[in-house]
Image (tube, helix red, strand yellow):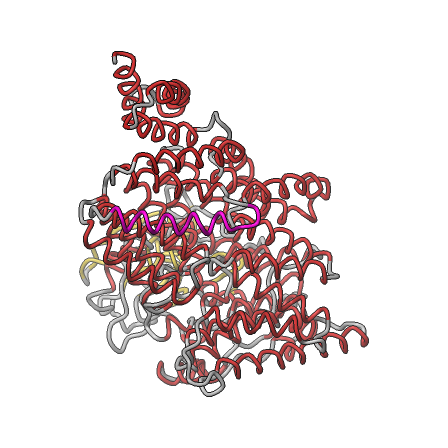
Amino acid sequence: MSDDSHAALPPQIGPFRILQLLGEGGMGRVYLAEQDHPRRELALKVLRATAGPDAQPRFEREAELLAGLEHPGIARIYASGTAQTPAGPLPYLAMEYVRGRDLITHAREHALPLPERLHLLAAVCRAVHHAHTQGVIHRDLKPANILVDDQDQPKILDFGVARVIGHEQFTRMTAAGEILGTLPYMSWEQLIGDARLDARSDVYALGAVGYELLSGAPPYPGLSQTTLLGAIEIVRNSDPPRLSRAVPSAAGDVETIVMKALAREPARRYGSAAEMAADIERHLAHQPITARPPTARYLLGLFVRRHRALTAAAGMMAVALLAATAVSLRFAWSEARARAEAEERSAELAAVNDFLRDMFAAADPERALGERLTVRDVLDVASGEIEADPSLPAAVQAQLQRTLGNTYVSLGLAARGLELLEAAAGATRDPETRDRLRLEQAQALKAAGREAEARAQLEEWLPQLTAAGAPARRLRLAAETELTEILALQGYPDQAEAQLRQTLPEAESALGTHDDVTLQAGYNLALTLHHLTRYDESAEQAQQVIERLRSRYGAGHPRVQLARDVIALNYREQARYAEAEAIYRETVATRQRVLGEDHPQTRAAEVSLAAILALDGRAGEAASVARVAHESLRRQLGEDAELTRNVASLRAYTVSETGEWTEAADIYRGLIAQAEANPDGPTVTDLPDYNNLGNALKHLSRYDESVAVFETLLRHAEPLVGTDHLHYALFQMNYADGLVHLGRTAAARAAYEHSIPVLRRDLGDEHPRTQKAITALAALQTR
């Protein structure tokens, strides 16, 4: 058979009779063929002899991929092999023959109305999602690769350039000057040759296919007549025309869905093809969709990237304040509203923008008299301005208070954040926003160490959310997830796990596996299993969350790193210090690159690394890292920020490992003084600082002071955790050790006798701490 002959058909290839030529391309030809056993017609794809050295591996990989994809929306493969012909060996794929036309032609010839076209698009999304769940990214989705059969079932073809996640050695990467894919349907990251493509690249292609299916033209029509460089220039400097210009009936939800899929930045697209399908199905069922038009947060991101020379404080302030305009901007972008409400929202937007401009001015070095402003400086100025400016409308004030309040909390300044959130709740009229604020207030209470209050609020509120049914389901699941974290912090991981075993499956079913609430519940379960010392289960759960986060946000996202830290925690408890260190070093490097070396979250990651170094016997190196991080946070956030206090405690631990017990004791004293200065006194999270100070004083042979600290600790711990709690028993054991040194054997014996049953119950008879207490009590009894 001549490769250039279109007239002559080979009578047979392998066991298949050739009936006609269906199509051909640069890689090969597709014939309509017939098979005897079983008797059926099929599509026979054969490789050209001149296809090039990389064609056969790609051809073979397509056969492997299709063999593993069983879905009604993906063309099946029946067989693959190599036929011996006069021209030499001829690789082939025997595939399901789809009697139908390509997606666009089918819709045009049948004059399908908009809803039927959307049903087709949703079906394609579901098929693509199935491929993604098997780790396969198509990379060349286009109308020509989607045929619709006579049952109106779309079928996806041609996985020849697909990427296999986790098996990149089998994935053919783009060579210099070569394009894999079709320009009008290629995502931005595919155009610029980013090898780290994920499911969102196919989501972009689905958006482009959907745009053409609905409007009759691709989103960037000029791409089909240009070069790769020309395509990059077009996509970089322009946006697709709004879909509603070509299809007025698509205005609103349909346009929002398609344009979200077509977003240039992967993070702004749907996290999965299933999410896109779900939104299409919600629209067809006349239900609210999850997608929204571009928010102020996205606009801010572009602004920050263009102005990297701004101080870190001004940049973070910009994030907080621009995010505060999101509610107002939603009104401007929403569908038609009553004129009076629109005017009100417009006035609110203007007020927020004025406030933003003033805050940028406040961060200007000239206005600051040349001083280097910290993040807290700018936040304090901003919150003071909100309270002092009588011209701010109440709605604008509430928006800004909510945003700044959450910013304070995220920086470890929970007490101030809580004040602003409470003020915002009092001024907010919108019921949905009030409910969100209620959850955020509980999160702030938790961050402030007031877990008991946060738990009480959530447990009081949850029955109301349950009674509200489906409309409040998402908020209820988020509140249940938050409650589990508090339970674990309070030392009740069994209760936390029981709740999560109910919440997580419901969230996966109702919200999807990649929803933020579902991901948080999965993360909390991994952390809870860690608290329960089920380290292998915890790591397995964390890995599942990591894969979902990577699929949605990309490998370098901070939430991915946070989930990987859970695995590092498990490694630490298993004394696998080298593996834990590798994860923490990667976290530090990522945060340095993304956030900067002096960012609070970078410093927090450094201290986690320092703790591992100390456990691994490298106390000097650990203490050096911890000191730098602590001083940086004291300078940026102040002594009383929760993040600063947490890092101070870890610094004390690392310096104690070097034998610097006096420095450690001084740090713990400072932390205790801060705790006792709180109006409500110390919280559960403050108790370890008393315990650590008592132990440091014992190492300094200052037993009278040590015993006095433990007596204060037990007095605070009794109402906070109860005398039957494991932590209380551990504190008692350390207290008893100090009493022995003072010769107060009767009191020591009583403390051991109370603590040992709890240690046995929670740690087991063979645990080193249980054995230590039993041995010490036996020695006292002998004495």
Q: Total label count?
A: 0
Q: In this view, does 586 lie above or below 53?
A: above
Compared with residue 758, is residue 606 higher up or lower down, i.e. above or below? Answer: below
The x and y percentages for residue 89 are 19, 57
Residue, x 33% and y 56% (percent of image)? Answer: 605
- Describe residue 539's horizontal placement relative to residue 415 as left or right: left
Comparing 510 with 532, the one in front is: 532
- In the rendered view, does 380 fall on the left or right side of 697? right
Q: In this view, does 731 lie above or below 10?
A: above
Q: Look at the image and give the residue range highlighted in magenta.
A: 661-680
Residue at the spot x=40%, y=56% of the render?
A: 550
Measured from the top left, where is residue 392 in percent x and y?
70, 75
Q: Quadrant of the image for the N terminus?
A: bottom left
List x then y, in percent, for residue 46.
Answer: 30, 60
- Above or below 749: residue 86: below
Between 749 and 405, which is closer to the camera in this rendering? 749
Q: Does the magenta stretch include residue 89?
A: no
Q: Residue furthest bottom?
A: 366
Q: Main secondary structure of the magenta part?
A: helix
Examine the structure image and report whether residue 676 is included in the region drawn in magenta: yes
Question: Which quadrant, please, contains the C terminus?
Answer: top left
Q: Could one spot residue 138 in this view of the protein? A: no
